[in-house]
Image (cartoon, grey):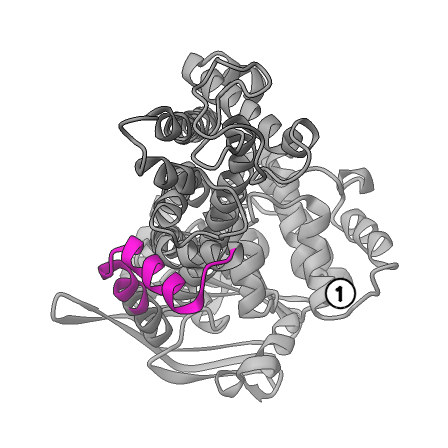
C-alpha cells in the first residue's frame, strides 16, 4: 500500500464569474522512502497540490489517503495529531518562521504540541535535532532573523523532522538558496532519507535539482498531469510539449544522486 | 542608535515625557506631600492663590486645599486613563484577532457588534452605563472602555487579515498547533504594533471622558477628580475663576503630555521598522 495516494484531486477558483481549475483531476502515489517530484511552469498548480495534500486548503473533489487513513475525513484533534507524520518545508525560510521566534522556540513547538518530550528533556532534544541537520547546538538561543539563509533552511528541516514524519512536502525548498548552499541542503535531504526512510514530495521548477534528488517525476501543465515516470527517463527523453520546453530551459543537469 | 536616544532627539517627545513624569510624580507623592483626606477643610473658604504659602493655590468654596486636590486628582485621572486604555486595547485586540482569524460567521457577528458600538456616541454610552450601574472608579473605567475598544478592534482585525496569509501561520498549522494558540501566540503579537500606536489617543480621550463624567457628577464621589473640581468651581466662576482654571490647566497639560509622548514613541518605533 502506498504511503500517500492522491486520486482525482481537483481545486477550482472563481475569478470574475469564470471558474478556473488550478488543479484538475490529478492522481499520484508516493511509496515509503521515495522522492516524487512535482515539476511544471509557474501556475501549473504544483504549490496548490502541496497545500491540498497538507490540508492547508480544502479540495473541491478527489481523495487523499495517507498511511491508510482517509486524510480528508480527519478533523480537529485527530487531524492535528496526524499532522505529526506529514510535514512541510517552505520556499522562503525567513517568512516560514514567526518573526519573533528563536531557533529554540521554532523547534520546541512541535515537540511540545505532540508531547514528544517533557519540558525538561526538550533542550537536549532541540540540541540533538540541530546536530541531525548539521548545525551547532549553541545556535538554539539565536533569533531566526540573525542566522544565515542556509542555516535557516536547516532549522526548517529540523522542525519538520522533529515529529518523526513519514512524508515531508518540500515546496521549492531549495529554490531561494544560493547554489553552494543548495547543494548542501540537497545532500542533507538525501542523507536524512537514506537514514530514516522519509518520503519526499519535492516541488520544484528546476529540473536539474529534480534529477539530482527525485526517483519519480510528475510534470504538470495548467493543473493537469502532462507526463510522469522515472525522473531521469522523463528528463532525458521528455514526451510532452511542456516536458520538452522545461528540459530545453534547464541550463545544466548536474548529478548528485548515485 | 538606541530607541531611547532617538526618542530624546525629538523635543516634542521630550516635552511630553517630562510632563508625564511630573504627573506620575504628583500621583505617586500625593499622599506623602498631602497626607490625610484632600477633601478635608484646610483653611478659610475661597482663599485666592498665592496669598497664604501654606495653601499656595488657595482654597475652594468649602475651604479645601486646591493644590492637594490637584495632586490627588492626578491619581484619578492617570489611573482611569491608563486602566480604560489598557482595557479597551485588550478587548479590541482579542475581538479583532478572533474576527480576523476565524473569518466567516464569527467575523460577521463580532464586526457587526463593533459597528453597533461605534454608531452610539461613546460619551453617551459611558453616561448611560454609569447612570444605570452607579458611579465608582471601576465602573467609570468599564464605561469608558465600552466606547473605546472598537478602534483597536478594527485595526487589529485588518492587521490579522494580512498576517494570517503568511507562511509562518501555515507552518504553525502544519505542525498541528491549535487554532486558538495560532491566533494568540503566532498572530496577535505580530499584529500588536499598529494597535498599540492608538494607545496615546485612547489614554488622552479616556482622561477627558472621565473629566466630563465627573463634571456631570457621575464620577466616583469618594475621589477628587479634576472634572469634579471644575464643576465645583463653575458655581463661583465670576468671583473665583481660579477654581476652574487650575484643574483645567492640569487637564490640558496631561492630555498634551500623553499625546506628545505617545506620538514620539510611535514615530521612533516607525523609524526603526522602516529601517530594518
Dot 1: element: helix
Q: Is residue A123 left or right of residue B62?
A: right
Residue placed most toward the observer, A175 or B143: B143
User: Could you tell me residue B212's position as x and y percent?
Assistant: 34, 45
Q: Is residue B241 left or right of residue B182?
A: left
> Where does the magenta region start and end?
B113-136
User: Could you tell me residue A105's position as x and y percent?
Assistant: 69, 51
Residue located at (44% from left, 24% from top): B264
Whether residue A238 is situated above or below residue A251 in the rendered picture: below
The question of residue B120 being in magenta is answered with yes
Q: Is residue A92 visible?
A: no
User: Could you tell me residue B193's position as x and y percent?
Assistant: 46, 41
Residue occupied by mark 1 = A196
Residue located at (37% from left, 50% from top): B213
Q: Is residue A138 visible?
A: yes
Q: Residues within 10 Å of mark 1 (few under 14, many from 20)?
A: few
**Chain label for disc 1:** A
Q: Is residue B205 left or right of residue B70?
A: left
- The quarter of the picture where residue A183 lies is top right
The question of residue B103 being in magenta is answered with no
Residue placed most toward the observer, A59 or B75: B75
Outermost residue toward the front in this view: B44
Amino acid at each position: 500500500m502506498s504511503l500517500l495516494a492522491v486520486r482525482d484531486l481537483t481545486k477550482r477558483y472563481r475569478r470574475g464569474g469564470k471558474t478556473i481549475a488550478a488543479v484538475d483531476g490529478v492522481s499520484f502515489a508516493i511509496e515509503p522512502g521515495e522522492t516524487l517530484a512535482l515539476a511544471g511552469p509557474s501556475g501549473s498548480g504544483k504549490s496548490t497540490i502541496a497545500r491540498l495534500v497538507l490540508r492547508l486548503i480544502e479540495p473541491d473533489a478527489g481523495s487523499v489517503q495517507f498511511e491508510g487513513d482517509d486524510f480528508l475525513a480527519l478533523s480537529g484533534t485527530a487531524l492535528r495529531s496526524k499532522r505529526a507524520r506529514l510535514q512541510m518545508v517552505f520556499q522562503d525560510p525567513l517568512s516560514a518562521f514567526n518573526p519573533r521566534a528563536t531557533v529554540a522556540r521554532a523547534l520546541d513547538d512541535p515537540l511540545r504540541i505532540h508531547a514528544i518530550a517533557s519540558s525538561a528533556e526538550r533542550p537536549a532534544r532541540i540540541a540533538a535535532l540541530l546536530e541531525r541537520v548539521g548545525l551547532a547546538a549553541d545556535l538554539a538561543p539565536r533569533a531566526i532573523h540573525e542566522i544565515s539563509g542556509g542555516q535557516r533552511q536547516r532549522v526548517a528541516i529540523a522542525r519538520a523532522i522533529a515529529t518523526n514524519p513519514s512524508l515531508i512536502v518540500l515546496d521549492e525548498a531549495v529554490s531561494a538558496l544560493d547554489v553552494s548552499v543548495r547543494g548542501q541542503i540537497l545532500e542533507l535531504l538525501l542523507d536524512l532519507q537514506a537514514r530514516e526512510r522519509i518520503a519526499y514530495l519535492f516541488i520544484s521548477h528546476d529540473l536539474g535539482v529534480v534529477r539530482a534528488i527525485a526517483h519519480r517525476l510528475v510534470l504538470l501543465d495548467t493543473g493537469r498531469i502532462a507526463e510522469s515516470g522515472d525522473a531521469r527517463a522523463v528528463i532525458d527523453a521528455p514526451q510532452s510539449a511542456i516536458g520538452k520546453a522545461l528540459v530545453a530551459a534547464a541550463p545544466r543537469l548536474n548529478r548528485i544522486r548515485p | 542608535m538606541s530607541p531611547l536616544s532617538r526618542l530624546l532627539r525629538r523635543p516634542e517627545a521630550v516635552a511630553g515625557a517630562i510632563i508625564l513624569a511630573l504627573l506620575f510624580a504628583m500621583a505617586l507623592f500625593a499622599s506623602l506631600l498631602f497626607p490625610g483626606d484632600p477633601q478635608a477643610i484646610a483653611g478659610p473658604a475661597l482663599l485666592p492663590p498665592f496669598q497664604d504659602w501654606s495653601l499656595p493655590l488657595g482654597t475652594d468654596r468649602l475651604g479645601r486645599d486646591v493644590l492637594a486636590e490637584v495632586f490627588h486628582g492626578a491619581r484619578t485621572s492617570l489611573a482611569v486613563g491608563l486602566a480604560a486604555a489598557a482595557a479597551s486595547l485588550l478587548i479590541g485586540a482579542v475581538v479583532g484577532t478572533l474576527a480576523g482569524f476565524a473569518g466567516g460567521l464569527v467575523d460577521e457577528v463580532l464586526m457587526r457588534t463593533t459597528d453597533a458600538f461605534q454608531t452610539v456616541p461613546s460619551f453617551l454610552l459611558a453616561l448611560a452605563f454609569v447612570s444605570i450601574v452607579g458611579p465608582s472608579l471601576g465602573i467609570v473605567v468599564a464605561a469608558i472602555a465600552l466606547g473605546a475598544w472598537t478602534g483597536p478592534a478594527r485595526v487589529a482585525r485588518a492587521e490579522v487579515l494580512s498576517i494570517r496569509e503568511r507562511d509562518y501561520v501555515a507552518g504553525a498549522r502544519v505542525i498541528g498547533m491549535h487554532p486558538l494558540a495560532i491566533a494568540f501566540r503566532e498572530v496577535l503579537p505580530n499584529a500588536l504594533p499598529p494597535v498599540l500606536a492608538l494607545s496615546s489617543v485612547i489614554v488622552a480621550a479616556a482622561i477627558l471622558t472621565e473629566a466630563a463624567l465627573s463634571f456631570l457628577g457621575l464620577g466616583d464621589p469618594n475621589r477628587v477628580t479634576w472634572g469634579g473640581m471644575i464643576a465645583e468651581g463653575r458655581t463661583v466662576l465670576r468671583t473665583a475663576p481660579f477654581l476652574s482654571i487650575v484643574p483645567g490647566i492640569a487637564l490640558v497639560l496631561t492630555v498634551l503630555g500623553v499625546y506628545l509622548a505617545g506620538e514620539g514613541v510611535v514615530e521612533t518605533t516607525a523609524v526603526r521598522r522602516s529601517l530594518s
